[in-house]
Amino acid sequence: MSATNPLIVSEEEPFAVGKTNLAFFLNNPVRCEGGAVLLCRSGSAEMTLDLRRSTIRPDTVVFILPDTLLMISESSPDFEMSYCAFTHAIFSEVCFRLEPSFFRFIGASPFSLIDRTESRNFDFWFETMEYSFRDRENMFRMTIFKNRLQNTFLEMYDKIQRKVTSLCPTTSDRQTELFHKFISLVHDHCAREREVAFYADRLCISPRYLSAIVRRITHHSAKELIDRTVIMDIKVLLQSTSLPIQEIAYRMHFPDQSYLGRYFKKHTGLAPTLFRQQSR
């Protein structure tokens, strides 16, 4: 695993542009404080962003919202992505006037396979962003960067929305909105609530109807998405802290350490202690 996170940004260096194989994230779930736009150049990888998992291959665009959990489970030796990372503050400023539906939609649809013409346009975009990144003497550097970033947000929203709509013509606007709300609720409550009924009740629909919506859009059950998020959060605590398993069980609201161990092994095939040893 690479010793450094290429997507790290700070107040002193609020954005970064370059190329990476994302080796830092290989079997290492990390919560990204800022946001990022990425384009696959070569090779392939299995990437997970919170509840969503996808095979990344050339011409795949990935949009990462701040506070998203990112992990690569496997990748080819020639895997490489262009990236543009930015702080949460830049993200908030750029998106100030965008509709809330934009963030829900991008959060639920972070991966998009684009055609060659669109990919060439993104090639040019990354070139211009990298030029701005290196042109540190330009007095308008940050303004130029923010304007270009906002334009790309809008372009991505339009293209991804049209693509997903064409792929899911039987999904109504109301069902899509319920799905987005479900995703948001899972992020907020999965540490304590792991049953579909809780989320269906918060959405004022039946568990069966919620499960049908989720399966229609993702081809996975609602329970699978909940459990996947819980497992990712447990992995983060196991890898990024030295907390005892009992303390992790307490934080994730499991009855005890043994219950968490059985739950974790059921979904990963490994005991928590063994996973921690193998990931360090």
Image (cartoon, grey):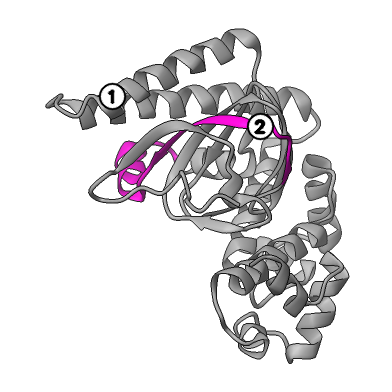
Under tag 1, what secondary structure? helix
Q: CA distance from mark 2 to mark 1?
A: 25 Å
Residue beneath disc 2: 79
| Residue situated furthest top in the rendering | 117
In percent of the image, x 75 and y 57: which residue is there?
225
Q: Is residue 206 above or below residue 145?
A: below
Left or right position of 261 against 277: right
In percent of the image, x 69 and y 53: which residue is there?
51
Residue beneath disc 1: 132
Q: Looking at the picture, which amino acid does disc 1 mark? A: Ser
Q: Are marks 2 and 1 in contact (CB under 8 Å)?
A: no
Looking at the rendering, the stretch of residues picked out in magenta corresponds to 74-99
Residue 274 lies, in percent from the top left, at 77, 75
Q: Looking at the picture, which amino acid does disc 2 mark? A: Phe
Under tag 2, what secondary structure? loop
Q: Nearer the viewer, residue 88 or 101?
A: 88
Mark 2 crowdedness (10 Å alpha carbons): few <14, some 14-19, many ≥20: many
- Tell me which numbered mark, 2 or 1, is placed earlier along the sequence: 2
In percent of the image, x 72 and y 32: which residue is there?
44
